[in-house]
Amino acid sequence: MKRRLILFLFILIASPAWSESIFPYKYQEAKLENGLKVILVPIDNAGLVSYTTVVNVGSRHEIEPGHTGFAHFFEHMMFRGTKKYPADKYSEILLEIGGDQNAFTGEDFTVYYVHFPRRFLEKVVDIESDRFMNLDYSLSAFQTEAKAVLGEYNKNFANPFFQLEEKLNEIAFEKSTYEHTAMGFLKDIQDMPNQFDYSRVFFTRFYRPENCIIIVSGKFNPEEALSLIKKYYSAWKPGDYRPEIPKEPEQTQERKAAIHYEGDTLPLLSIAYKAPAFHPASKEFAALSLLSDLAFGETSLLFQKLVLQEQKADFVSGEYIPHMDDYLFNIAARLKNIQDLSVAEQAIFETLEQMKQKPVEAKRLEDLKSNRKYSFLMSFDTSKSITNGFYRSMAPYLALIHGVAAVDQIFKTYDSITPGDIQNAAKQYFQKEKRIVVTLTGAKS
Amino acid sequence: MRRFILLILLITTPPLWAVGVIPDTQILLLKNESPLVAFRIAFLTGSANDPAGKEGVAALTASLLSDGGSQKNSYQEILQLLFPMAAGYSSQVDKEMTVFVGVVHKDHLNGYYELLRNAILTPGFKEDDFDRLKTDQLNYVAKTLRFNNDEELGKETLNWAIFKGHPYGRPNEGTTSAIQSLTLQDVKNFYQDQYTTKNLIIGVAGNYPPNLIQKLKQDFAKLPEGIADKESLPPAPKIEGVRVVIVEKKTPATAFSFGYPLSFTRSQEDYFPMMVMNSWLGQHRTLVGRLFNVMREQRGLNYGDYSYIEHFAFGGSFHQPPPNFSRHQQIFQVWIRPVPHAVRHFALRQAVREVQMLSEKGLTEGDLQGIRNYLLNYMVSLAQSNSELLGYALDDHFYKLPKSYFDLSKQNLESLDLNQVNAAIKKHLSTKNMVIAVVTENAEGFKKALIENAPSPIKYDSPKPEAILEEDKLIMNFPFKIQAENITIIPADKMFE
């Protein structure tokens, strides 16, 4: 009876079971009764399996003052063991299976992965499910790991781009948790050793099955994988915590900041505008995303002018990374001389005005749509890159919220975008009062 | 004209373990069903071949080919043409290898190949490209390397200090003064001398059509043949005693790298026992290594601590070594990621003590079994894509391995016994003669501490097990006295001048 019940805990939600899609492999989606989602992507290779767990928690969810950086801190704590597999035992198993594993944290999600030979599938499902369900660490381990996190911050701080991003977010957002980077504010990182009790609260809030998705890719038997996931994760109890993420009030005035970098560096310029959240059906998102390449990519007129012809900058880029909530459309440039900061700033403003005034050439837009499709296809060439592709491009959002089928939806949305849509998006979002400008210059520049 | 010898590896997926190289092969083919066609076009030349006073010309030549125009198209046009394909090619220059790496979907193979071929065989050598890329290269050394990444600065300082006066002894991008003096004619001369069929190895993988190989043969045969015998590399400088180079700059934490030249590469027997040693001591960015466990996991000193017996490029970015940084002379290296200044002396003592203990005691049978299993299993994840497989095959060719690196490693690891491992450790692992590179502030204070060899206690915010506190006493008093004359302080903005 029990056995039969377990079988029904597992519900296939993909229709048809094996889907056809722009996604270059057949895949299967499933969901356990406790809410845990699973995506299975079998690929023929020499015997490697990539096992990824995406948790719907990032710095966005750090809503309480004094606790920024906790999602990232938790990524570290997840290697500190359970009663069944204490940290040294966990490491011992990784040693035994030759596992290549790591994790990282973004604003909206945290990702854990292990690459390993296929014969260890059950072992990996066992140790991974155990730490997600039963993490258990001592105060001492917690406080020691807090120091490692501080070490990571210190390592990053030498990089001027890190400082630029930190300042940009800090002045761009007042209420939104995007105000801090995934690392968190330095003062909160320094205080982490004192937050042991909070860490337990954080874990029980977010590390719940309905908040996670498992992606298995590579050489494995999907039926076996499903059965193992069911076996090891079914006892995981769903939670009921729903964070109230503060909404950012509308920005009504341009904001500016200047960073004085210790040491020498080329001057950096970041010009950002408030831009809408990701949704695969959002024409605004798709139009702005395409615009980022058209106006600021390597084939743009601005790149040709500033980088290739006048050689005032060594790079210019437009970046519009999908986020759960309204975020930033960010244009960055690195100049060769400090006096060219204002030249580049003006050139960027003029480019945005042109995007408002004049529709882009249809041929350029078509080339870009082709570029997007082939970029997507080429980014999924191994089981590891599926893991990578899933979290590096758009997939955490798709996987957690919309399912892999949303990949097709976003490409349909891209296909539907006209030069007029891009022009309209430019008019709507590139307004001076929605702008944030940050510069960084070195002490010796 | 030299005849091309083809090695065709007709392999369907899975290709792993199946890539091999035979001596004198110039075209490596890995045929499989992947719609992504990967190219690696390698020249056995690099920054070690920079003429005296022209340090950086190998890197500038390669970037002018990959990031500049061809005779047919401007760089701007090339970017436009590649754009719909979502494809590109890049160059990678190390001491003895220059590789052009690219991948394209087979739908765009013909157009892509033409651009790649033109870039390498008929470069434009245009003044405006030259000016742009030379400035970028200079800025990289003068700004980025000196100031924007303390860990890379530490590693480059270590390499520079170990190989001073040797062709390896500078960043691949060159020195600031040499880069400033480079002319377009220098680049053309380097191209003429080094981009030859004698130096060339071509790798192609994926579901490519047979006529592509004919085209490659015909096209690349147009390169000059090149001189028969290249100058051999001088031996690595002999390090005597412990030397410290402190690069001083304002920074929130102290970065360390230390090491010394090794007398073997992966083509020699001792590589495999030392591979076991290295994995045990400091396997890159995993939970496996001893240094990581005792320094980060137990004491929270920093973000990670690792060791190497082969050059690992971009270690801060990658978890696994990118291929085609093959070198005939390697160094043993320990990388201690930035530690708070207050514990810099303790951290250095601990890392050196760990290496010394390993050199004296060796590994146990249990250590060997554990690491052997780990490595045999771990290798399956080293090369997965066509491009990575080609990269490994090119490295096999460089080192003249009798079989693929993967096969050779498997064979050697399986047959290793503890005596071999500990004999190799005795022979190759030591802390007596080495260079320590430090990136920190208050350099004089650290110099004084090293000279005085005073105890370096550590304080924790949290309770620690008694065993750790006891060991800390040994670490803080670990005798590691450095002579004043062996310590050099250099301001960051004077490095690599």
Image (cartoon, coloured by chain):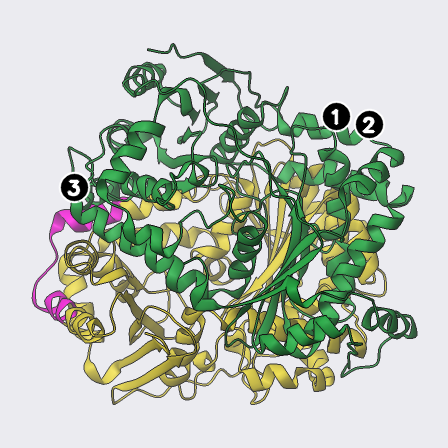
Please name the residue shown 78% across and 63% down the image.
B294
State left or right for residue A216 relative to residue B293: left
- Is residue A367 on the magenta stretch? yes
Q: Quadrant of the C terminus of chain A?
A: bottom left
Amino acid tagged 3: Ser
**Secondary structure at numbered mark 1:** helix
**Secondary structure at numbered mark 2:** helix
Q: Which chain is green?
A: B
Q: Which mark is residue B415?
A: 2
Chain A: give its colour: yellow
Rendered image quadrant of residue B255: bottom right
**Secondary structure at numbered mark 3:** loop
User: Looking at the image, is A74 positioned above or below residue B420?
Assistant: below
Pinpoint residue B463: horizontal percent, then vertical percent: 84, 81
State left or right for residue B489 relative to residue A280: right
Spatial separation of the CA atoms under disc 2 and disc 1:
6 Å
Disc 2 crowd, CA 10 A, few/some/many (<14, 14-19, 20+):
few
Residue found at the very far left of the displayed protein? A358
Q: Which mark is residue B74?
A: 3
